[in-house]
Image: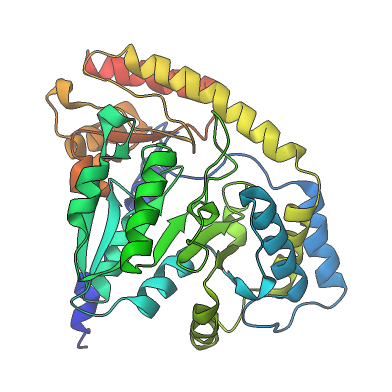
Amino acid sequence: MRIAKRMSRLGTETAFEVLARAKELEADGKDVIHLEIGEPDFDTADSIKEAAIGAMRDGLTGYCPAPGIPALRKAIAEDAARRRGIDLSPNRVVVCPGAKPIITNTIITLVEPGDEVIYPNPGFPIYESMINFVGAKPVPLPLVEEKDFKFDIDEFRSLVSDKTSLIIINTPGNPTGGVLGKAELEAVAEVAIERDIPVLSDEIYINIIYDGEHQSLLSIPGMAERTILLDGLSKSYAMTGWRLGYGIFPEEMVEHITRFNINSISCTSHFSQYAALEAITGPQDHVQRMRDEFLKRRDVIVSGLNDIPGFSCRTPGGAFYSFPNVKETGIPSGELAKRLLEEAGVATLSGESFGSYGEGYIRLSYANSVENIENALSRIKEFLA
C-alpha cells in the first residue's frame, strides 16, 4: 500500500507512547508511578454526568448542529466574555470533540505550504506536528528557564517575517507550567496588529493558575478580530475522556471551521454537549478544590525535585506540570526518562518530546496523589544515587 508522503511529516504525542510502555511493564508485574500523562486524576463531577445521562434519556443521541448546540455556544461565549472582560457573540464559538481539532483546523485554514508559523518550544508537540503536516516551516520561539519559561521579547520580534502566517502561544503552558505576563502578551499583540497576523492562543489551563489572575490575548484592544482562542473541558473539569473542546474564532473563520467539522466529524456528540453546558453554568466548587489540591502537590514536587542532586526546578505558575533542569545529572533527558521508567518505575517524559529546546529537561505531571509523588521523588533520588 502506498502511503501519502505527508504522513511522514506527522509527529506524535509521546505521553501516550510512554503510557502504553508503562502499562506493559505493569502487566509484567512492575510497580509504576504515573507522572507522564497530562490528565487530572479526579473524577468528573456527578452533576455533569447526570446532565449527560438526562440528555440521553431525553433522546438527545442523534446529530446536532456542526458548530455546536446553541445553548452551549451561548454559555461558552458568556463565560469567556466574563473571564476576559469583552463582548463575545455565540456565533464565534465552534465546539469540537476535544481541543486538538482547534489546532488542526486553524492551521489547515490559515497556513499555506511554505508559510512560517511561530510556536512555543518547548511546547505542546501537536503544534509543530501540524505545521510540518501542512508543509509550512515551524519557527520555534524558545521559552527561557531564567524567565520562568516566558520568551525573550526581542527574540520573538526577530523571528517574525513576511512569511509568518500564524503565531501560536500557550498560557499557562505545557510542559513548563509557565505563565505569560502582560509584557509578553502586549508584544505579541503589537506585532499581530502591525502585520495583521492571526494568533492562536491556547488557554486550556485557564482554571489552573496559582498566582494572580489569568491574562488573555483576547482582552487586548485590536486582538478580538485576530485571535483564535482555544479552550475546553478536559483539564478544568476532569473530562479528558469526554472529548470536549471549543474555539472562539474571528467571524470570517467560523464558516470555514464549521465546514471542516462537517467534512471531518459531522458534529460533537449531542448528549456530551449537555454535560459541557452543566460544567460551565453549574457549580464551580469542584474546579476550585481541584486547583487547590494541585497547588499543594506543586509545592511538594518542586521542593522534592530541588532536593535531588543534579535537578533544578522552577516553580510553575499554572497547569499541573513541573519541568526540572536535569543537565547536571550528566544523563541526556531521553535516556534519563527511559531509565527512570524501566529501572525506577517512575513514568516521566523527556523534555525533547516537546521540542529541541526541551533537551536537558524532563516533564513530571503532578496529577497524582501527594503520597505517590513523594514515593516517586524517593525512587528518583535513589536511582541517581
* Quarter the C terminus occupies: top left
Residue 233 percent coordinates (x, y): 62, 55
Residue at 32% across, 52% down:
14
How has the structure been colored for display?
rainbow
Q: Is residue 330 above or below residue 77?
A: above
Quadrant hosting residue 231: bottom right
| Image location of residue 299, percent across then percent down | 49, 19
**Left/right of residue 118 with respect to residue 55 in the rendered view:** left
Tell me the residue at 84%/78% (across/down).
Answer: 59
Residue at (42% x, 72% y) in the render: 106
In-front residue for pair 297/157: 157
- Relative to 277, residue 313 above or below: above
Residue 253 visible in image: yes
Furthest toward the left, the residue is: 330
Please determine whether, in this image, residue 356 is positioned above or below residue 348. below
Q: Residue at x 35, y 30 (%)?
A: 345
Q: Nearer the viewer, residue 180 or 3?
A: 180
Q: Give the answer, above or below, for where 184 lies relative to 135.
A: above
Instruction: Using residue 255 as the reference point, say whether residue 290 is left or right of it.
Output: right
